Amino acid sequence: MSDNDTPSPLANLITEAREGRLGLRIEPEDFVYIDRDCTRFLELIENMQREAEDIANIEASQWGIGADVPMLTSAQTLVSRFKEKAKGSDNSVYAVLDEHYKIVQDIQTLHNVIKDRYIAADAEFAQRVNALLERLPEHPTPIRAVPSQPGVTTASPQPEPLSP
């Protein structure tokens, strides 16, 4: 998401996979599911970052705690801290989510590089991957937040696995 030049956490593994020095024992279905789930997770992170931006852009008068009243400096301070925590510091929600985004991208890239090497070397593996990819929906099911209450657990809805 950001354009800084810091090396990615998995850069060495991705390079080793590209150069054929790293392998992974995994089924074709696992590659497809990892790619699908990484895509879904990246979309969720982007949505959360948009929410953090929205919070950072709320006008002082819209907070409803008097932050637009010059005499209420504590309200102004509180709103300023919330906005900075949303997006505006190195440790903001937005910045932390950006780091998570990069890691998920690296995981997805790493698995795709390994998958592509398997496909190039094994026709049967390639056929199984391609058959699975043809059955995937065009747009993956988004990951939705599950409402929760302390002490109450619910089963999180999981996407349907692709059957052979």
Image: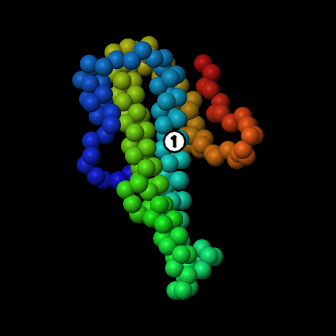
Q: Quick one: 150 or 1, which is closer to the camera?
A: 150
Secondary structure at badge 1 equals: helix
Colouring chosen for the image of the structure: rainbow
Q: Position of residue 118 (x, y in %)?
A: 37, 18
Q: Position of residue 43 (x, y in %)?
A: 51, 47
Q: Residues within 10 Å of mark 1 (few under 14, many from 20)?
A: some
Q: Quick one: 162 or 106, which is closer to the camera?
A: 106
Q: Position of residue 103 (x, y in %)?
A: 40, 39
On screen, residue 50 above or below 33:
below
Q: Is residue 89 left or right of residue 128?
A: left
On screen, residue 86 above or below 1:
below
Judging by the rendered image, the residue that carries numbered circle 1 is 41
Q: Is residue 59 left or right of residue 124?
A: right
Residue drawn 73% across the image and 37% down it: 153
Query: Mark 1 is on which residue type?
Result: Phe
Regarding residue 120, the answer to whether it shows in the image is no
Residue drawn 48% across the image and 71% down it: 80
Image quarter hosting the C terminus: top right
Residue drawn 51% across the image and 41% down it: 41
On screen, residue 108 above or below 58:
above
